Amino acid sequence: MLNKKIDSNFIISIIGLPALLVVFFTIFGGNRFFSFINFFNIIQQSVAPSFVVWGICFVMIMGSYDMTPGVTIILSSMISTLLAIKLGYIGLLLGGILTGLIIGAINGFSFLLFKVPSVILTIGLVMIYGVLSKGRGLYLPDGLGLLSHAPYNLIIWIIGGVIAYFLYNRTTIGLHIQTLGSSEKIAKNAGVNIGKTKLIGFLICAIFGGIGGVFYQSYGRFVQPQIGLTSLLLVFPALTGFFYALAISKRVNIIIAVVVGQLTINLLMNGLIIIKLPTTIQQMVMGALLICVVAFGPRGSSKNTLIVK
């Protein structure tokens, strides 16, 4: 009986809201929404934000905030494009990974050095990175857009998910991050190196964000530098997906929940566009959803409860 209850909760957590969205938008959007091509596009649109949010998990779960994923996407898109022109697809992927590695190292060491709240620190770093990214926009040449097409994007998506799952659930650093998020005092008493764990968390976050930037650039083919905090808007839908994933993480592993969250958010955004709601209404719906998933998400009962430091 217990197994049936667990299985039922697991299934409802995964397909509950997505199923409701499919029914709603099929009624009002018809075949424009309910079609294989549209659903396949939604899946492909979930690849880039999934990478970004997998990275965010490693910082947020350990109890910190990282506001730099948006500017990481922009810088990664720019650097990977420049390297891709010289080195092809190797340069494209290498640019994303190296950008993430550098930004993650700066974020992590700055957090350890200045010892200020992570949200304040990373907002300041966003403004600094924004100045560094100032310049003309960059186009990714047409011959380098293979990662925007199946099966290549889906293969890397699956590989990235497996790596994220392994890092989070099967490694010492993943266990330390989860322990640190539950209680820094307990983590310290258990022998966890707090500084090292936080540094690696920021590194993982930025590297996954850098790879996400490669996919964003592969889909859009053009990146425009942004100054100030405007880069935060890039990751707002992805962050909404993260909080939705956090809300269902009591029953679904957070790495898997991220995929469910991104698919759900993209279902919603796609449906709102298809039924031709004004942009202002779309933003209101997204904002209302964010408030709801945070308000009704896990509190103290979940191992992934968010305690921000």
Image: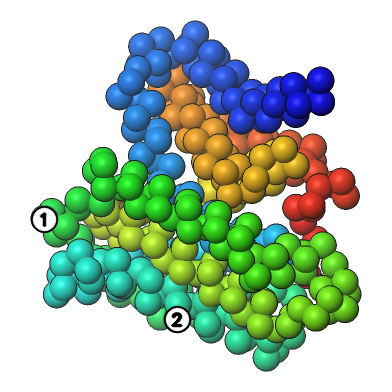
Image position, residue 101 (x, y; %): 45, 77
Q: Check disc 2 and report the residue beneath it.
A: 102
The residue that appears at 84% across and 76% down in the rendered structure is: 190
Q: Check disc 1 and report the residue beneath it.
A: 143
Q: Amino acid at mark 2?
A: Ile
Instruction: Say which element carries label 2.
Output: helix
Q: Quadrant of the C terminus?
A: bottom right
Q: Dots 1 and 2: beta carbons under 8 Å? A: no
Left/right of residue 246 with respect to residue 155 in the rendered view: right
Lower position in the chain sequence, tag 1 or tag 2: 2
Q: Quadrant of the N terminus?
A: top right
Q: Name the foreground residue: 251 vs 85.
A: 251
Q: Name the foreground residue: 39 vs 129.
A: 39
The quarter of the picture where residue 99 lies is bottom left
Asked whether residue 155 appears in the rendered view, the answer is yes
Q: Amino acid at mark 1?
A: Gly
Left/right of residue 37 with respect to residue 115 in the rendered view: left
The residue that appears at 75% across and 52% down in the rendered structure is: 304
Image position, residue 243 (x, y; %): 66, 46
Disc 2 crowd rating (10 Å Cα; few below 14, some 14-19, many 20+) is some
Disc 1 crowd rating (10 Å Cα; few below 14, some 14-19, many 20+) is few
Q: In the image as oriented, which residue stretches furthest toward the bottom?
A: 113
The residue that appears at 33% across and 60% down in the rendered structure is: 214
The quarter of the picture where residue 75 lies is bottom left
